[in-house]
């Protein structure tokens, strides 16, 4: 298997498992990740996803020999919108409505950076090396790096690496806000799972509406988000989870949410 899907209670784990090839991404692997994102989005019993790589490296990048004809033909990513969500968030406007946490280590190049930019929380081992190497291979990033890297690390920081193909360290990524946690090598998944369990213990409807409101503000502006936020709050406050949250506060215990 090159992509392994597992569940732990309300958490979907997506493992990149091609270590003998440094987890280089094929089109088949892309489709399996896209299907996993769709499963996370549509399964009411799944509340948060964790993406991680098996082996010393998260990924060395694309398996270019498998992708050349897709890009030279102008077709882009081979998405099936009926049961897939594009992890690059480039093929259409569909987004996974539930939070995704990335855990990376070793090489995290090209597509690894670009899909990580769409994650909501990012954890990196201290040995991680990030890179958008495309200009060193004769082309340029087309999975969102040109669009989103500047958003997260600032324009000139992004251009510093996009235009040169130079790598940057885990410490650099943390300093620029690209990742939220640094760990010892081998501890990145443990930290990501700790965060995922924390997210999964929160009210799922509240979590999803945080993402919805934040993304709306990012893509359409603050005014668009303001127009709908109180209607969305009103709907969530009618939920069983809202009643459970209030009751748990009164009873001084931890709330047990059901996503209803």
Image (tube, rainbow, N blue to C red):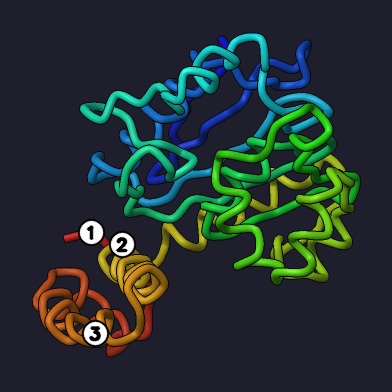
> x, y (%) of residue 166?
89, 46
C-alpha span from label 1 to label 3: 15 Å
Q: Residue at x 53, y 12 (%)?
A: 69
The residue that disc 1 covers is 259
Q: Secondary structure at mark 1?
A: loop
> x, y (%) of residue 145?
62, 49
Mark 2 touches mark 1? (CB < 8 Å) = yes
> x, y (%) of residue 198?
51, 62
> Of residues 234 and 95, which is closer to you in this image?
95
Q: Residue at x 47, y 18 (%)?
A: 73
Q: Secondary structure at mark 3?
A: helix
The residue that disc 2 covers is 204
Could you tell which of marks 1 and 3 lies nearer the N-terminus? Answer: 3
The answer to whether residue 166 shows anywhere in this view is yes
Q: Is residue 260 left or right of residue 53?
A: left
> x, y (%) of residue 228?
17, 80
The residue that disc 3 covers is 246
The answer to whether 107 is drawn above or below residue 177 in the figure is above
> Of residues 9 and 147, which is closer to you in this image?
147
Q: Secondary structure at mark 2?
A: helix
C-alpha span from label 2 to label 3: 15 Å
Q: Residue at x 71, y 67 (%)?
A: 153
The answer to whether 87 is drawn above or below residue 34 in the figure is below
Quadrant (top left/top right/bottom left/bottom right) for the C terminus? bottom left
Q: Closer to us: mark 1 or mark 3?
A: 1
Residue 57 occupies which quadrant of the picture? top right
Could you tell which of marks 2 and 3 lies nearer the N-terminus? Answer: 2
C-alpha span from label 2 to label 1: 5 Å
The circle on residue 52 is none
Residue 65 occupies which quadrant of the picture? top right
């Amino acid at each position: 298997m090159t992509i392994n899907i597992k569940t732990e209670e309300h958490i979907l784990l997506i493992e990149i498992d091609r270590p003998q090839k440094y987890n280089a991404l094929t089109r088949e692997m892309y489709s399996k990740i896209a299907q996993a994102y769709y499963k996370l989005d549509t399964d009411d019993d799944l509340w948060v996803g964790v993406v991680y790589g098996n082996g010393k490296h998260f990924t060395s990048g694309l398996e270019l020999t498998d992708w050349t004809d897709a890009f030279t033909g102008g077709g882009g990513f081979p998405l099936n919108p009926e049961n897939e969500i594009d992890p690059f968030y480039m093929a259409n406007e569909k987004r996974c409505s539930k939070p995704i946490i990335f855990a990376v280590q070793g090489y995290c190049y090209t597509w690894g950076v670009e899909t990580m930019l769409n994650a909501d929380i990012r954890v990196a081992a201290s040995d991680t090396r990030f890179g958008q190497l495309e200009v060193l291979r004769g082309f340029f990033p087309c999975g969102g790096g040109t669009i989103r890297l500047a958003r997260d690390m600032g324009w000139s920081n992004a251009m510093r690496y996009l235009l040169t193909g130079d790598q940057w360290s885990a410490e650099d990524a943390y300093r620029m806000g690209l990742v939220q946690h640094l760990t010892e090598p081998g501890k990145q998944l443990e930290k990501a799972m700790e965060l995922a369990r924390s997210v999964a213990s929160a009210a799922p409807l509240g979590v999803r509406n945080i993402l919805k409101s934040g993304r709306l503000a990012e893509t359409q502006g603050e005014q668009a988000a303001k127009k709908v936020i109180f209607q969305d709050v009103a709907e969530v406050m009618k939920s069983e989870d809202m009643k459970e949250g209030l009751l748990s506060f009164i009873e001084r215990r931890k709330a047990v949410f059901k996503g209803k």
